Amino acid sequence: MTGKRRRSYEAGHRAKFLVVVDDTPECDRAIYFAARRAARTGVSVTLLSVVPPGEYQHWLGVGELMQAEAVEEANEFLDAASARVRDIAGLEPERVVLVGNKSEEIVRHIEEDEDIALLVLAAGTGSEGPGPLVSMMAGKAAASFPIPVAIVPGHLTDEEIDALA
């Protein structure tokens, strides 16, 4: 993946930590880590929620209604995540909602925003594995990804993250 050159630390730019927000229990670990680390390093936080595209429904605009409901739900997750960032670090995060395939939209957003310096994900602790995004980032995609990825273990406590961030 080649894209825009990172400009995060150049004059007129400000580095951003990107956190993918969803309804997984481990998501809070990524939010907590990013907020603490951002506050300590003078970086901003961007919270991203990706809504899957609605299936084609042409009858009475059902597809559009379903899409609007999904975007509303994503904004509710971002409301909670934004409040958490404010509580943890006193920062006002940037919020982004995109519609599409999650991994493709994450990469596209990173490519378009040259100030994103780090993607922060949290690994799930369940028996089903670390999660699809973490698995993708730890696999083949890692070699060609445009920015570093921080993977926060989902079992870490606030105190343990404080010691690391």
Image (cartoon, grey):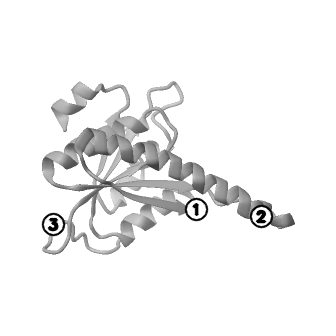
Mark 2 Cα-neighbour bin, 10 Å: few <14, some 14–19, many ≥20: few
Q: Residue furthest right?
A: 59
- x and y, in percent, of residue 123 in the image: 40, 36
The vertical placement of 88 against 127, above or below, is below
The residue to which callout 2 is attached is 56
Say whether disc 3 or disc 2 marks the residue closer to the N-terminus: 3
Task: Measuring from the top left, give residue 70's x and y in whole percent.
Answer: 63, 53
Q: Where, quadrant-wise, is the N terminus in this rendering?
A: bottom left
Q: Residues within 10 Å of mark 3 (few under 14, many from 20)?
A: some
The amino acid at mark 1 is Gly
Vertical placement of residue 97 versus 132, above or below = below
- Secondary structure category for the residue under label 3: loop
Q: Give the position of the C terminus as an image quadrant.
A: top left
Which element is circle 2 on?
A: loop
Give the residue at mark 1: 100
Residue beneath disc 3: 9
Q: Which is more N-terminal, label 2 or label 1?
A: 2
Q: Residue at 20% x, 55% y: name it.
A: 43
**Lower position in the chain sequence, tag 3 or tag 1:** 3
